[in-house]
């Protein structure tokens, strides 16, 4: 963790909804006139698209049918840890972008499925903001989580996560249900070993729970809407959280445990604004005071 150069990380699985949560942070940053540096977890994958396919084939030939982007061998965990450590100490560091499609290719000037060149951070930022798969990962070799000042987990219940992934990958990437199902199955060991443990490291978890039947996610025709959901918000350390204020501001909310509040799904954005804005401002003000000292 850093006083002068704070880091915020959103972590969650593919299809969990981290990109939507990122938009709320962007709104807060714009409103409060903050100057963040954004980095994406995909930038720290080890292989480009073609290389990843080859590594998966090689792994399968060895009898390993679970090689995935969730695991340690397909990612640059050491480089991610170095980036977080460097930023926390100096406000510097570097990142790159992974180009997903033709639209991003126009923006970045690199072909889809490839990485851009590494670039150094612009000086003078207020904080570093990460969104991706491994913002709080801890292994025997690296401890990314220790450098992050505010760790956010986005964790819909598993059937909802699969429904969201199925619909996203089929609509945006043209995959079949069978192909997405195969990906889910292939990633499962790495999901258990590298994704799930992060949610014990996170400071706040946002878990969306549908109130409609999602018992067979592979035949669901639509994603449950926010109004068909509740969201469980769990605080690792509830000290300083004004639960009476949140309950008064978010109608139909209630506390399920001493460190958890449950809200209607349609109130997630306002809940995040109420909870996260003071936390972000506190981190940034603390950093500015330290830099002036």
Image (spheres, rainbow, N blue to C red):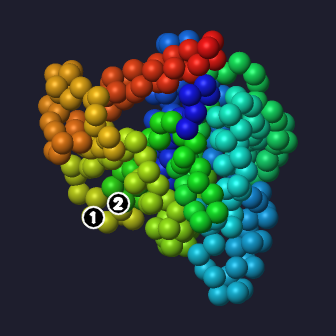
Residue at x 27% of width, y 49% of height: 209
Q: Which residue is mark 2?
A: 159
Q: Which residue is mark 1?
A: 215
Residue 77 vs residue 132: left or right? right
* Camera-nearest residue between 293 and 142: 293
Q: How many marks?
A: 2
First-in-chain label (2 vs 1):
2
Indicate the quadrant containing the C terminus: top left, top right, bottom left or bottom right: top right
Q: CA distance from mark 2 to mark 1?
A: 7 Å
* Residue 32 shows up from this direction: yes
Query: In the rendering, at what x and y percent does residue 182 appear?
Result: 53, 72
Is 195 placed above or below 130 here? below
Query: In the rendering, at what x and y percent does residue 28 appear?
Result: 47, 20
Indicate the quadrant containing the N terminus: top left, top right, bottom left or bottom right: top right
Residue at x 66% of width, y 28% of height: 37
- Disc 2 packing (10 Å; few <14; some 14–19; many ≥20): some
Q: Is label 2 in contact with label 1 (beta carbons under 8 Å)? A: yes
Query: In the rendering, at what x and y percent does residue 3 appear?
Result: 56, 28
Residue at x 35% of width, y 60% of height: 159
The disc placed on residue 262 is: none
* Camera-nearest residue between 159 and 86: 86
């Amino acid at each position: 963790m850093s006083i002068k150069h704070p880091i915020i990380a959103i972590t969650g699985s593919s299809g969990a909804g981290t990109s939507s949560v990122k938009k709320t942070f962007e709104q807060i940053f714009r409103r409060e006139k903050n100057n963040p540096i954004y980095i994406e977890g995909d930038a720290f994958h080890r292989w480009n698209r073609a290389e990843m396919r080859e590594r998966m084939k090689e792994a399968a030939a060895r009898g390993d049918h679970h090689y995935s982007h969730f695991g340690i061998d397909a990612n640059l965990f050491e480089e991610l840890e170095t980036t977080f450590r460097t930023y926390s100490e100096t406000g510097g560091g570097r990142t790159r972008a992974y180009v997903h499609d033709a639209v991003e290719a126009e923006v970045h000037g690199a072909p889809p499925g490839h990485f851009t060149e590494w670039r150094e951070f612009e000086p003078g930022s207020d904080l570093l903001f990460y969104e991706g798969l491994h913002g709080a990962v801890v292994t025997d070799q690296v401890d990314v989580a220790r450098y992050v000042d505010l760790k956010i987990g986005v964790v819909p219940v598993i059937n909802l996560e699969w429904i969201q992934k199925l619909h996203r990958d089929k609509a945006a990437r043209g995959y079949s249900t069978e192909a997405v199902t195969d990906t889910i199955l292939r990633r499962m060991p790495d999901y258990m070993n590298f994704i799930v443990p992060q949610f014990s490291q996170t400071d706040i978890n946002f878990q969306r729970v549908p109130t409609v039947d999602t018992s067979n996610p592979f035949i669901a025709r639509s994603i449950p809407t926010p109004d068909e959901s509740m969201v469980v918000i769990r605080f690792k350390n509830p000290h300083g959280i004004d639960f009476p204020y949140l309950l008064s501001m978010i109608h139909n909310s209630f506390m399920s445990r001493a460190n958890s509040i449950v809200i209607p799904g349609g109130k997630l954005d306002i809940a995040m604004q109420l909870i996260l804005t003071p936390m972000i401002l506190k981190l940034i003000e603390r950093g500015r005071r330290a830099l002036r000292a």
